[in-house]
Image (cartoon, rainbow, N blue to C red):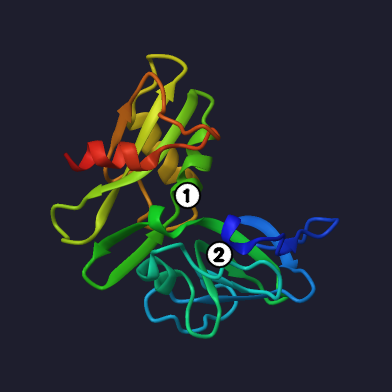
Amino acid sequence: MTEVGSVIGAPPEKNQDSNTRGCLLGKPLANTQIKVVDAITRKLLPPGVAGEMCVRNPYKLLRGYINNPEATARAIDSDGWLHTGDLVQYDDDGFIYYIDRLKDIIRIAPDKTTTIQVSPSEMENILMSHPGVGDVAVTGIPDPDNEGYELIRAFVVRKADTLSAEDLIEFVKEKTPRKYVTLTGGVRFLKNIPKNLTGKNMRSELQAQAYE
């Protein structure tokens, strides 16, 4: 990200054997510090637990946002750690795995004692493995039974009109490794998925429609 001012890590020459879900980022470069913290409490997290990636280095790390002290305070703590807003986790060998942007994470509550964080990218990758799916974006919609939580909805561009929402819901149930992580918010078919100039899904636009 621009605020970091330099490359902070690199993947190994060969892929590591790991059951960790996410995109392998590798290990921090020399003189670069990375830690993973709880996004709310800011406490350090152990290997295998997803949290916000924080970065500190002696290079061109952002000093602050011009004329915006509030944004600066949210991004950079008193110890000089930049809170990136990226959800990552690391394994026992110190390899870091990118999962998603924190703001896009879907929080579901399948029962009163269980809360699960779901990465939209994880669900999108599962759905894109279906031969009948041309494009997809996943976001959360309000859960009417659990205030403050969401249901998982998929917006899909299908290759053939014969593909149904029920087909995809069952497909995800079979493919997802995690209990409760299913398309509880249903499926909506679109002609195209809105994207920004870099080709990334504009989930916020779809989510705004879902909340209307």
Q: Quadrant of residue 188?
A: top left
At x 43% / y 69%, what residue is drawn? 72
Find the distance from the CA under tag 2 to the CA under tag 1: 19 Å
Tell me, yes or no, if residue 1 can be seen here.
no
User: Is residue 2 left or right of 140 when viewed as pictured?
Assistant: right
Tell me, yes or no, if residue 158 can be seen here.
yes
Is 180 located above or below residue 73 in the figure? Answer: above
The disc at residue 88 is: 2
For label 2, the crowd category at 10 Å Cα-Cα, with few meaning under 14, some 14 to 19 and many 20 or more, is: many
Count of marks placed on residues: 2
Judging depth in this view, the residue of 114 and 146 nearest the camera is: 146
Q: For the residue labelled by badge 1, is the local secondary structure a helix, a strand or a loop?
A: loop
Which corner quadrant holds the N terminus? bottom right
For label 1, the crowd category at 10 Å Cα-Cα, with few meaning under 14, some 14 to 19 and many 20 or more, is: some
Most extreme residue toward the top is 161
Is 187 located above or below residue 207 in the figure? Answer: above
Q: Position of residue 24 (x, y in %)?
A: 68, 57
Which corner quadrant holds the C terminus? top left
At x 49% / y 45%, what residue is drawn? 175
Q: Position of residue 187 (x, y in %)?
A: 31, 33
Q: Position of residue 95 (x, y in %)?
A: 70, 68
At x 20% / y 43%, what residue is drawn? 211
Q: For the residue labelled by badge 2, is the local secondary structure a helix, a strand or a loop?
A: strand
